[in-house]
Amino acid sequence: MVVPKDLKYTPTHEWIRIEGDRATVGITDFAVAELADLAFLELPARGAVVERGERFGEIESVKTVADLIAPLSGEVLEVNGAVSENLDLLSDSPYGDGWLIRIRMRDPSEVESLLGAEAYERELEHKGA
Amino acid sequence: MTMLLTALHPAHEEAGAQLVDFHGWRMPLRYRTIADEHHQVRRSAGIFDLCHMARIEIDGADSGGWVDHLITNDLGAIAVGQARYSLITNERGGIIDDIVVYRLPRSLFIIANAANRTRVIRWFEDHKGTRRAAMRDRTMELSMLAIQGPLSAEILGPHLRCDPPLDSLKYYRAASGTLFGVEVLVARTGYTGEVGYEVFPPADQALTIWRSVLQDGRIAPIGLGARDTLRLEAGMPLYGNDIDEQTNPLEAGLEFAVKLEKEAAFVGRDALRRIAAEGPSRRRVGLRILGPKVARHGMSILDGDRVVGRVTSGAPSPTLGYPIAMGYVDAGSTGGRLDVEIRGTRVPAEEVPLPFYSRTRRSSGRTRRS
């Protein structure tokens, strides 16, 4: 399982790239592999407000649907339109072209509650990944 | 509870299939992605392990009367070498199982759902009376494989000898023959909406046949995940989802398999005659979901503010590129534009005729963009 060192993570398999007060959010290689058969993706609109710990969208595979959980609170500045049209971007490049939303963080101290790469890897080990 | 393993289990493990527990059997859900396997069957060919299905043989002097008394279709109209889809119904006309019945030279052969194997056997035994007949559960000694897809005849042809020959075996006909030298029953039946065959080798030969078929690079193994999306596109009901003992064949749109006027009185006939006379209170429909969400079993179907029905099966359609669903709506509902409640959101849908996909009718379906 690929777990880039420079990113932050959540136990619900979102990754976060922090740049100043901006955060780019996506889902990890592990999450994509678990879902396997990606079918549809629902993302919020630009300008929407997301709240840490709450659902900001969903991803549907043939057999199941999974909520996307916001790792941080803030305003959605950008939504990746390309990935909704082409879910292969998500399977091929979950940390790159498969990014999902970019937000302006409302409360940068929330970053402290995110997992580092090693902590996330330990989470995956517990799952037997 | 330990799961039963099919004769093909070693092959599934070798292939790295994702295995799931399915009605007492450990079965392959998928080997690659469900969408890839689905497209494989529509475009080329796939081979399915169907050993979990029940294989029951009935013979004896009174076997015909026994079976005809318990199935909705007319056994008398099934000639040797023919097969027919049928329902087994209870006294209220509720569906105990959907089956395929084959008339073989010396016996009747029934394929029932894995979920209902015990129930069907018990039902037959309870209704045997003093008839001179015997029922044998051959599920363990025979295996069952399906080869489905436009190239299936081309792939099997060189290796399958049967009488009549494979290229003249008509739909819902069965023949005995040999496949890679192994004696098999072969039938032109299937659950995918493509041309295909179901073969029944002895269980101890199944693995050899599986591996031999897969020598041909044009065919690949297909799991239960794609089996479900294929049959859904073909508008075929799945027992437990779309039909159950609280559903009658008439509301399920399966009246083609119900012969109310056949000579043999069958269990459920009187109830079904009443339902036919009054008209069923609900009807099975196909829905195209007009939004990027998948409707699934149990979700409500609304017409304006009224709940008019429920979804019984749903999935993204790999071939058509949009989510599709089957369900039931009140008979009085005029269909057209409806809504489905999907996880708290009202999603527009429209009723569309079944099947969603037909290989003979090139419909408006488009393939997925990505």
Image (cartoon, rainbow, N blue to C red):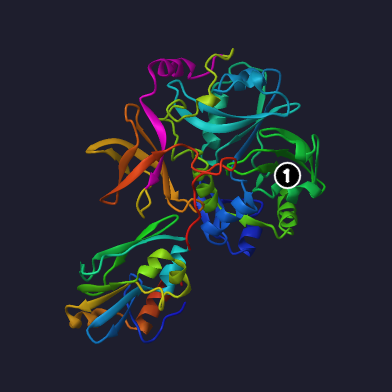
Residue B309 lies in quadrant: top left
Regarding residue A124, the answer to whether it shows in the image is yes
**Which residue corresponds to mark 1?**
B201
Residue at 26% x, 51% y: name it: B345
Q: Which segment is the magenta one?
A: B265-289
Q: Is residue B294 left or right of residue B183?
A: left
Q: Does residue A19 appear left or right of residue B199 in this picture?
A: left
Place of residue B134 in the rendered image (x, y in percent of width and height, measured from the top left): 67, 25
Residue B40: % across, % down: 60, 55
Disc tally is: 1
Task: Please give the name of the residue rendered at 42% of the width and 30% of the height, measured from the top-left corner.
Answer: B247
Residue under the point 40% across and 68% down: A83
Residue A14 magenta-highlighted? no
Q: Amino acid at mark 1?
A: Pro
As displayed, is residue B67 above or below residue B100?
Answer: above
> For residue B271: magenta?
yes
* Placement of B239 over or under A118, stated as above or below: above
Q: Position of residue B239 (x, y in %)?
A: 48, 38
Judging from the image, mark 1 belongs to the subunit labelled B
**Whether residue B333 is situated above or below residue A61 in the rendered picture:** above
